[in-house]
Image (spheres, rainbow, N blue to C red):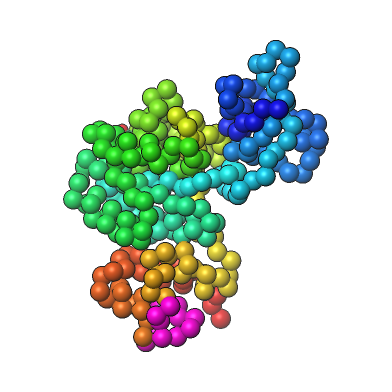
Amino acid sequence: MLEGIIVKGIGGTYEVETEQGRLKCTLRGKLRLSVERVLIGDRVEISLDEGGSGGVVERILPRRNELIRPAIANIDQVLVVFAVQQPAPNLALLDRILVQAELMGLANVVVFNKADLDLGRAEELRAIYASIPYPTILTSTVTSQGMEELRRVVQGKISVLAGPSGAGKSSLLNALNPDLDLETGQVSAKIQRGRHTTRRVELLAFDQGYVADTPGFSQLYLEPGQEDRLQFAFPEFDRYRDACRFRGCLHRREPGCAVLEALERGEVAASRHQHYLLFLEEVTPRY
Ligand SMILES: Nc1nc2c(ncn2[C@@H]2O[C@H](COP(=O)(O)OP(=O)(O)O)[C@@H](O)[C@H]2O)c(=O)[nH]1
Ligand SMILES: [Mg+2]
Ligand SMILES: [Zn+2]
């Protein structure tokens, strides 16, 4: 029995990356009929056909996690890619994506691309996110800044890309692996937006890792009544929380709030706390 990872699925056929290369596989009947869908990212056991060019997926190995949109299993991390400029980063959207990933238990890596356009701003942005702390990488596909760091970060992992159109996600993937030859640029970005609804999830292979260049993560999803959970999606609050005067402090304007004091001292970024309040408002039911 050979082990592999499902990287692509079209109709009833799946492409499975294995030690013996990429094999086209069908599903064993019981998997076709079962309620549990095979997902991109699934680790599977396959039996080889006579010829050895294809196989049959016999079993799905236990999943570490699974995402509904995009539908991917066994995700290691979310790579959140924003441009330093063109388009200027919407930090509320960036924080929303980070919070959503945190709430799903996924690790975050922050990438600020197009660092060539404004190195000063790039460093300011890095300071905010590196202090949380998130691994934060400044990249440029023009100067190749940060590309080795990015390569190390995706190595041996399954990563999902998130971030606005035009940030340079496809350009970064092409720089990591020129064989991918993904479409980039304004025009194709527009076409892609139109295609997003129907585009299939696919894992793009690198030396040892996989990246899904798929839309998603644009909406914060919190059930009403989860307002006290939100603060745990802000890792920079962790070291202060226990020092708040009141148990159950929501770090809004409570007296003796250690998070607000840290904000005052500049140890918590103003934009981050502001977005925390914004999201808190969104998830707090109104009476
Ligand atoms: N100056 C600069 N432009 C970039 C960089 N990376 C990508 N671009 C340009 O930004 C535009 C959008 O890139 P694309 O990869 O399609 O973005 P995506 O929508 O996130 O996939 C294209 O015109 C790229 O040539 C960069 O590091 N620096
Ligand atoms: Mg793209
Ligand atoms: Zn507090």
When the figure is inspected, residue 78 is found, relative to residue 229, above or below; the finding is: above
Q: Residue at 74% of width from left, 32% of height from top? A: 58
Q: Is residue 171 left or right of residue 65?
A: left
State left or right for residue 35 relative to residue 161: right
Expressed as whole percent of the image width and height from the top left, the position of residue 113 reads: 31, 43
Where residue 197 sits, quadrant-wise, is top right
Total of numbered circles in the picture?
0
Residue located 27% across and 34% down the image = 144
Report x, y in % for residue 76: 51, 46
**Magenta segment, which residues?**
242-255
In this view, the residue in front, 93 or 237, is 237
x and y, in percent, of residue 59 in the image: 73, 36
Q: Is residue 286 visible?
A: yes
Q: Nearer the viewer, residue 196 or 127?
A: 127
Q: Position of residue 103 (x, y in %)?
A: 52, 60
- Magenta span: helix, strand or loop, mainly? loop
- In the image: residue 7, left or right of residue 49: left
The residue sitting at 23% across, 55% down in the picture is 124
Q: Quadrant of the C terminus?
A: bottom right
* Magenta-colored stretch includes residue 248: yes
Q: Can you see residue 87? A: no
Q: Residue furthest top?
A: 51
* Pick the front one: 233 or 171: 233
Q: Would you identify the image quadrant in which residue 274 lies?
A: bottom left
The one nearer the camera, 230 or 152, is 152
Question: Which image quadrant: the N terminus?
Answer: top right
Residue at 55 percent across and 75 percent down: it is 285
Tell me: 42 left or right of 47. Answer: left
Reply yes or no: does residue 50 show up in magenta.
no
